[in-house]
Image (spheres, grey):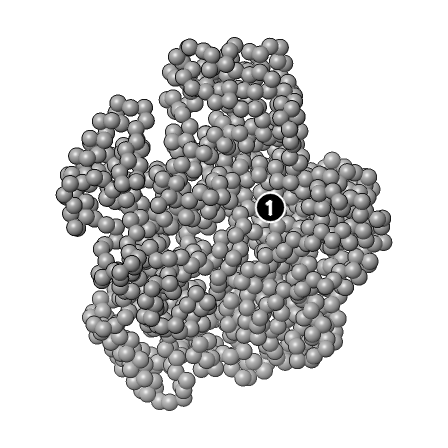
Amino acid sequence: MDYNLSGLSTREFEHVSQALAQEILGPGVSAFGDGKDGGREATFEGRVPYPSELEAWDGYGVVQAKFRQRTDQQPQDAVSWLKGQVKEEFEAWLSPTSKRERLPEYLIFTTNVILTPVPGSGGIAQIEQFVSTYAARLGLKGWAVWHHDQLCRYLDRYDSIRRTYAGAITSGDVLAQLLDAVSAGHKPRSGALTDAARASQHRREARLSLVPEERADAVLDWADKSSLPVVTVPAGTLAVLVAPMGAGKSEEAESWLREGLREAAGDPDVVIPVWVDAGKAVPDLLDAITRAGGEPASGLGRIVIDDLDGISPEQVAQLLYEARLLLAAHPTARILATCRPGIELGRAVVHEVAPWPVRRGAELLDLVIGDDARMLFEEREVQDLLTSPLQALSVASRLLAGEDARVPSLELLAGLAASVIKGRRRGSPTSQTWDRLARLAVHILNAGGPVPAQHFGHEAEVWELTDTALVVQEAAGLRFALPVFEQHFGAQALRKGSVLPEEIVTADAFPRWRYAIAFAVSASAPDEAENLMLRLARANPAVASWTFDEIARGKKQHHGMREAEDRARTTIARLGRADDELRTAEIAGTWLREALEALVEGFGPLSDSLVEMRDGRLPRWGVWAKEGWVAISPSRYSSEPPAVTPLASHPSNREDPEWRWWSQHLFPGDPLGRWEWARGQIREPLERVVRRGALLMPPDSPLAHERLWHLAQRLPLGNVNRDGVSVPEARWRVEAMMEHVRTSVRYTHQVAGYTYDSADIRWMHSQLAGVTDEVLRRPYGEPDQEIPRRGRMWQGYSPLLTLRITRQILRDALIGYRQLVELNFPSLAPALGLYSALPVSAEGMVVMPEDDTDGSHSGLIHTLRPKAAGHRNDPPEVDLDLWTEPGFGPTSRFPGGPVDAKTNFHRPYYVDRELSTGSSRPATELAYEWLVRDLKAVGWLGATVRLSA
């Protein structure tokens, strides 16, 4: 059908053009907001399936929208108008004074004007001929004009875009028919309000499955009288509540929606709010809102999208894109979503849910158990458990069952499902019921959302699960009544072998499975827990490290050397009969070595730089043990069996040359304690390597050139070349240093405050051998203007040169980050935040205001945005704008940010940093910044580690 494209505003037509470009050309299209766009509404770079897969464009392209307010004139007037618009754009690109730095290789014009199809003389033919006269001058490889009729056919094809703008583009008579059809089944406002309030109450009651039925009303009453502030979401805003499992994000979203219900009840002009589960919003958000009671034709108000964790990362990206599209078409709407940490949220405004005050948790506990439990509140362990609604209810559940509530939070949640099952057991469930619950958990965790009942089993099996009150059947499928049940039964499946640890440490699975993994390890018997940790460590050391930290968090810390020695002796005794000191030494050394070997295996090629190796294996250990203390001495010569040789006397008292040095420590007696010890053996040298920027990298990596320049420019060279570093002289100097390296166990060389170690010198020697140029030059070029007195290096670069260089720095940094991870941390990669999100596009702004004389208001504001499609090794897409207008300061608002959230699996969206133009290794600094943040999140780097100057 034909659509009234002139019913759109200029801004809306640009949005429609951007949306169609992203659908037709692919998710790699970058759209631009209001303001100076440099002659583009959207850009793309790389291969796109247009005009077809066989004739795919491959390069840099621009989409430009041309909207005409009046389209009721003669066809020739439309052609003349469009020619004038096209000419202005081409002349702007071709002008020597143009600020449009990059010329497109491909170009698409979109327009709402109608072009006649008469061959040779019609509007389409005239425009094609006119554009072709400029195409050769601009060097275009391909171009297209999407005119009115072409856009209408695209809108026929892409339903979600058509529906979003239906109110503006649908002709009056068709819209009237639609409204008549809707009105036939339309509920009065009072009925719609009643339904919305009833649904809200039902959701609230469902979340109280842990509360005895006779107490539920009192808890709801108490929550209604709460004085906690409700989150604020301005009109036209997409916001997300982020918090771990059970922290109360759905409750906060419900409070926000109920606030909207009260407003709608008191004011007929306020739109009734809508609640949508994320699983039901895919693939069509607008349709889901309509089915939930929303009325897009008459306007939208508050909308909650609950549980983004229930859908895949790709679906989250698409859903958030549709949400932004909907807000553009309905500026009075406001959207609040909920999710756990770990989901990429794009331009959404993030609100982290704050922990509850202990007093609030205590009040809830009092209400649920019906007894004065305040005697417990003075105990620190219990106080810490009252800072979230799920934990407070878990404490209540344990107390009602007569169990001790003084347990770590993870143990509390892991045992919660079992407590509820005991209390709510109906009939006599068989072992098959529990097996089916575990199988359902695997399906849900792998799928990332509810499972259609028919895909799981026949009706009798479904009834059996829903009869437990642990499983709920909805239109979207089967799900657990509480997320903690899902994790509990996922843990059961992992412990029983229904799912393998190696299968759930991937980039896609780990964020959903991580609590189930922690539950499984924490709830297992010691030997079972250790075996699970061994498999996790070999498959992905980052998962093992995160799991250990999660289990250790909140555990009681022991104090006193005597107590620690007793625990060490008890643990060694548990591992096997220790009849004498030699046998004790062998048991203790073998136990520790097994954990270290598992982590070393997980680290792969980087292991040689982190621990001492012999022929790809750990050297043989000489081990002495007494009274819980252990001394370990690596063999100087051998890695051959036996792996552990017990020593009758301390290594310090031996003259045997095989045991040349030793370390001594108290045997780790805590549960899983050997993993903390083993991680410490690797983490300290890893931190040194990271600080020096000495991780492995391909010889042709952009980071390799930066490191070579960084090291070579500090060499004591006699003849300083203004253009760079003399390669022959650098080779001669490094060869002289290599003589010392070859004859020393460890060699360092200090120049002007910088210390080269043996690894630096060996690497420079190898790298310089492959350099073919006579002069090694500064990465990204020299300054093009004078550096102000007492200024910084980047101030010597003009704005346009800074923009060009910074684009390349970001590209190189993304390539370098991927190479660092794949070469040094291949097993850890799936659990690293940025790597698991690749491919990403870098977007942002170089800010260099004309009036910023001291450089205090200049900088780079950028974001890394995950792409919905593509491969990790695709060339990075970088889109930066330049801001040179005066008045930009540190308080100026940049679209969409900034976001302060910093959690394990969620990175800040917008990052503001100083310009790095002129730095000796700018791409390296960015790549290591991202990598350090990811490694810290999973416990492999300390809080203060960063790339050294």
Residue visible at 66% across and 58% down in the picture: 250
Q: Which image quarter: residue 301?
A: bottom right
Measuring from the top left, give residue 168's x and y in whole percent. 51, 79
Would residue 314 be found to the left or right of residue 636 on screen?
Answer: right
Q: Residue at x 61, y 13 (%)?
A: 578
Residue 729 located left or right of residue 322: left
Q: Residue furthest front?
A: 790
Q: Residue 685 versus residue 788: which sits nearer the camera?
A: 788
Tell me the element at label 1. helix
Residue 344 at x, y percent in the picture: 50, 55
Residue 920 in sight: yes
Residue type at tag 1: Leu
Question: Could one spot residue 159 in this view of the protein?
Answer: no
Observer-nearest of 643 and 121: 643
Residue 322 vertical placement versus 570 (above, below): below
Asked whether, in this view, residue 807 is left or right of residue 237, the answer is: left
Q: Give the quadrant of residue 887.
A: bottom left
Residue density around tag 1, few if under 14, some if 14–19, many if 20 or more, within 10 Å = many
**In the picture shown, does residue 717 fall above or below 132?**
above
In which image quadrant can residue 420 be found?
top right
Pick the residue in front: 926 or 165.
926
The residue where tag 1 is placed is 445
